[in-house]
Image (spheres, helix red, strand yellow):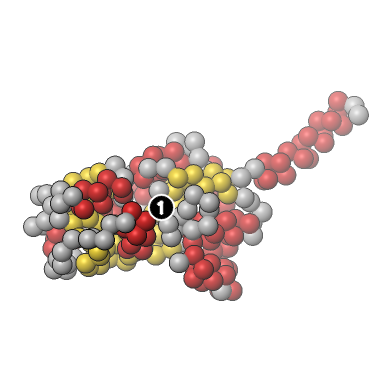
Amino acid sequence: MSVRLAIIAFLLLAPAALAAAPLRFTTSHAAPHSTADGTGSEDLVLKEALRRLGYQARILHLPSKRSIVNVNIGVDDGHFSRIPGLQASYRNLVLVPEPICTFEFAVFSKRELAIDGWDSLKPYRTGVIGGWMILERNLAHLPKLTVVANKESLFSMLAKDRLDAAVFELSEGVALLKQAGITNVRPTGTLVKRDLYVYLNKRHQALAGRLATALKDMKRDGTFQRIVARAK
């Protein structure tokens, strides 16, 4: 084969080779939303949506802050799942404009607490994980707020009475307590439910609309609902 033909063959095959390379998606979520073997509800929804577009996904579990920063600086391709509006703080992110899941943010405690909105936590020593923007924004004014590095530290402090309350996603928190064998902590009230979204690094901006359409199609044909039901 001549050099010219070799170059032409490379140029023709290169796009296919690039498309076959898995996109790297980061998350800080855990079971039942995301798992090490990629069988959480969000894992499976994202993989199926991308499969319909001809892509594969490699899912990386990182701490909350690092998970989003890596995508913003371009180390990784995408991130799930977060509240809308993060583009204001992370200028290299592009929102996929269709929710991938809905989170129920709940208060966990060893005792019954009267929970009625964010301000109801003012009397309590309250813990959250750093990097969860919705919690940091709405609870920053609390006089007894503690920000920890990870969920294990959060629930350990709660179990050891170093916190009165911990704010975390409901189903993920229940799964963590069960796995850790912590029986004296339970959810005691819901603060808010929020739709969460996928973000892409801006180099994948052209993919955002197509991925949103794939998610909508999955909800329309029932695939989305079946995946979520199986993963619970």
Residue drawn where x is 49% and y is 61% of the image: 41
Where does the C terminus fall, quadrant-wise?
Answer: bottom left
Q: Quadrant of residue 47?
A: bottom right
The spot of residue 123 in percent (x, y) is: 8, 57
In the picture shown, does residue 9 fall above or below 46?
above
Residue drawn where x is 39% and y is 39% of the image: 66
Where does the N terminus fall, quadrant-wise?
Answer: top right
Q: Which residue is mark 1?
A: 29
Q: Is residue 224 visible?
A: no
Q: Is residue 109 visible?
A: yes
* Tag 1: amino acid: His
The spot of residue 200 in percent (x, y) is: 49, 48
Q: Quadrant of residue 64?
A: top left
The spot of residue 187 in percent (x, y) is: 25, 65
Residue drawn where x is 44% and y is 38% of the image: 70
Q: Is residue 8 left or right of residue 201?
A: right
Q: How many marks?
A: 1
